[in-house]
Amino acid sequence: MEVRDPVHGSIHILDEEIAIIQHEFFQRLRNIKQLGFSEYVFPGATHTRFIHSIGVMNIGDKAFDKLFKGRSYTKDILRIKETFKLACLLHDIGHAPLSHSTESVMPSLNELKIPPRFLSEKDKSSNRQATHEDYTIKAIADSSFAESFADVEKSFGVERKFIADLIRGDTDEASYFTIDGIDYFILLHQLVSSELDCDRMDYLLRDSYFCGVSYGSYDLDWLLDNLEPAIIDKKAYLGISERAVVTFDDFLLSRYHMFVMVYFHYRAVCLEQLLFKYFETSKGEYTIPADIEEYIEHDDHHLMKIMRKSNNPYAQSIVKNKIPQKIFESFNNSQVKQLEIVQNYLENEGIEYIRCSSKGRLSKYYSAEDGHNKYSMKVVRKTFGNEGKEYFNINKATDLFTKFSNAHSINRLHCDTSLLTESQMTKIHELTKQ
């Protein structure tokens, strides 16, 4: 089977993978847009998590072949390669309608009844609210979707538990990922979720292409060509050649620019806040079921249909793509005090407003010392004569990594100016100009 992708060209699907892609759980992703409300700003951004997921698997396939270049593909290597490819393909299988926006109406983790062997020790005793990743694990572990894995299980010896482990980032059976005494679990998980994962490598190029902007462009081929395993204490970590650090800088900047110019666009962010207000003011009108089979019906179209029929004013604003006017915007922390002055005035006057705070970091594991980098990416430096290698953490190799390590925040205030008096408009104008 072949997929023609506008971003990566021809993508070849193995015969054993067809049943997984054709199953209704995966086909559901055709009806979930990759960028949620961004389509309301960038009309071309109608691409879905379906083609994104296939694109992630395609990049994963290339990354794996580069990291294992020159090695004979034994039965064990083929098993972990297919396990890894499926983790890339299925990382978004549990995504709710309109991207991350609807996770606030998900049930508790306990209600999903995920088999214990698919959960971390921490989650076994937790009753936190479920996330899209929990629905991903549930679909893989305990649903009708499981029947579609028969061919990959028979041909490659793939076990669904280890697909889930790669997505979660934790395993209690490292032997499954061990080849010739080297444990490759950390490296493969990093390619699923880290500062340089296949997910980001795909969505930056894809989102940039469909939004009609150039901010997300970077040299994918050079990055893939310079991936190297960093073997430390018989564990493999994701590494890149020292000569590709500048390209990694470009990758980081591309992501930063996409956040500022696309993902944090004021209109898309405000629409998301209106969705939260809809959920808060019409409790029970839309909820996400704990039953994984019922979840198949929950896509963007399903939610939009409910909102079209709703009398809730926030739902109607979303459907009609009408947001309150933006009256204040700050791109740095120095203006937060001024924003709060305007906000306090609105509250004292009894004026309804929406505050949108968009925060993001340039990297998922933004510091090697703060405890957030469970697995740090390595830079691989070849020693004199190429007779050996030495490794060091990525944040030691690039100034950009440190420069953009702090959260980037954009704060905005919106309100319906048509409801304001002339004196209120004048006062707000004075406060925003201080």
Image (cartoon, rainbow, N blue to C red):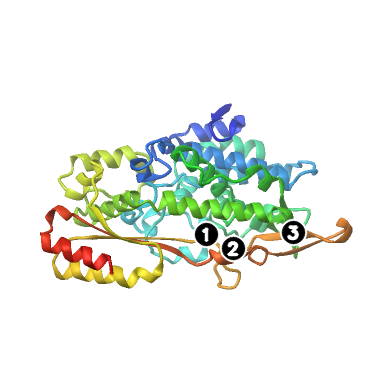
Q: Amino acid at mark 2?
A: Phe
Q: Position of residue 66 (x, y in %)?
A: 72, 44
Residue located at (56% from left, 71% from top): 371
Distance between the alpha carbons at the discs numbered 1 and 3: 22 Å
Mark seen at residue 192? none
Mark seen at residue 362? 1
Nearer the N terminus, badge 1 or badge 2?
1
Dot 2 falls on a residue whose secondary structure is: helix
Distance between the alpha carbons at the discs numbered 1 and 2: 8 Å
Distance between the alpha carbons at the discs numbered 3 and 2: 17 Å
Q: Which residue is mark 2?
A: 401
Please report contact status of discs 1 and 2: CB closer than 8 Å, yes or no. Answer: yes
Residue located at (58% from left, 67% from top): 402
Residue located at (19% from left, 56% from top): 281
Q: Amino acid at mark 3?
A: Val
Dot 1 falls on a residue whose secondary structure is: loop
Please report contact status of discs 3 and 2: CB closer than 8 Å, yes or no. Answer: no
Mark 1 vs mark 3: in front:
1
Q: Which residue is mark 3?
A: 380
Relative horizontal placement of residue 96, taking residue 217 as reference (left or right): left
Image height check: is 169 above or below 20?
A: below
Dot 3 falls on a residue whose secondary structure is: strand
